[in-house]
Image (spheres, rainbow, N blue to C red):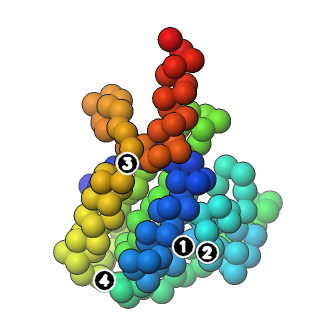
């Protein structure tokens, strides 16, 4: 079973997340697919190739791993990382405001295929550090379907504005 927290962010909030990760860890960011292998590697969460690309993979390079690439079978023949299921990665899903879909920070943990070749206890500590930072820096939270959704500053302002308009 994986572990996750639900989050709600804007592009401005995502910059804060990037800054935190880059200043505290040696991370590499990936988008889930791209027209070339080189474009899978991104420096910023806003650097995705497609408008609805919401998934960002975060690799803390302290944990050994080599990404492997494949091409999909669609007409665009996009590239993707084919060995993510047992990799030391966090998945950051951006909030899709146009669809009213919040994001999440997810770690597959035991929901993997194949052998885990990294220190799972150390990675869990990394996951806990990052999620505690998310919770500490959230400006608000809303319970939805029994689950807390943590809002960063800009997202919280948008949420409160929507609530005010609905009253």
Residue 122 relative to residue 139: left or right = left
Residue 128 relative to residue 5: left or right = left
Badge 1 is on which residue?
A: 29
Q: Residue at x 68, y 79 (%)?
A: 37
> Can you give x and y, in whole percent of width and height, for residue 72 in the image?
67, 66
Q: In the figure, 68 relative to 89: above or below?
A: below
Q: Residue furthest top?
A: 167
If you read the primary sequence from the N terminus, does the residue marked by circle 2 or circle 1 appear first? 1
Badge 3 is on which residue?
A: 138
Evaluate if marks 2 and 3 touch, with contact meaning CB atoms under 8 Å apart: no
Indicate which label's residue lies in the foreground, 3 or 4: 3
Label 2 sits on a secondary structure element that is loop
Badge 4 is on which residue?
A: 117
Q: Disc 1 versus disc 3: distance between alpha carbons? A: 22 Å
If you read the primary sequence from the N terminus, does the residue marked by circle 2 or circle 4 appear first? 2
Residue 111 in view (yes/no): no
Indicate which label's residue lies in the foreground, 1 or 3: 3
Q: Residue at x 39, y 44 (%)?
A: 139
Evaluate if marks 2 and 1 touch, with contact meaning CB atoms under 8 Å apart: yes
If you read the primary sequence from the N terminus, does the residue marked by circle 3 or circle 4 appear first? 4
Q: How packed is label 4: few (under 14 Cα within 10 Å), some, or many (20 or more)?
A: few
Q: Disc 1 versus disc 4: distance between alpha carbons? A: 20 Å
Evaluate if marks 2 and 4 touch, with contact meaning CB atoms under 8 Å apart: no
Badge 2 is on which residue?
A: 43
Label 3 sits on a secondary structure element that is loop
Q: Residue at x 27, y 67 (%)?
A: 129
> Can you give x and y, in whole percent of width and height, for residue 58 in the image?
47, 70
Q: How packed is label 3: few (under 14 Cα within 10 Å), some, or many (20 or more)?
A: some
């Amino acid at each position: 079973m994986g572990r996750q927290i639900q989050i709600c962010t804007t592009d401005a909030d995502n910059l804060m997340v990037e800054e935190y990760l880059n200043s505290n860890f040696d991370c590499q960011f990936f988008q889930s697919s791209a027209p070339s292998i080189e474009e899978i590697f991104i420096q910023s969460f806003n650097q995705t190739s497609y408008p609805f690309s919401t998934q960002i993979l975060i690799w803390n390079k302290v944990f050994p791993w080599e990404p492997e690439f494949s091409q999909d079978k669609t007409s665009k023949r996009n590239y993707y990382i084919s060995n993510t299921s047992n990799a030391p990665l966090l998945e950051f899903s951006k909030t899709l405001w146009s669809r009213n879909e919040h994001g999440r920070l997810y770690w597959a943990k035991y929901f993997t295929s194949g052998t885990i070749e990294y220190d799972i206890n150390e990675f869990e500590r990394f996951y806990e550090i990052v999620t505690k930072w998310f919770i500490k820096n959230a400006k608000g939270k809303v319970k939805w379907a029994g689950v807390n959704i943590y809002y960063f500053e800009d997202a919280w302002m948008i949420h409160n504005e929507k609530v005010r308009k609905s009253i």
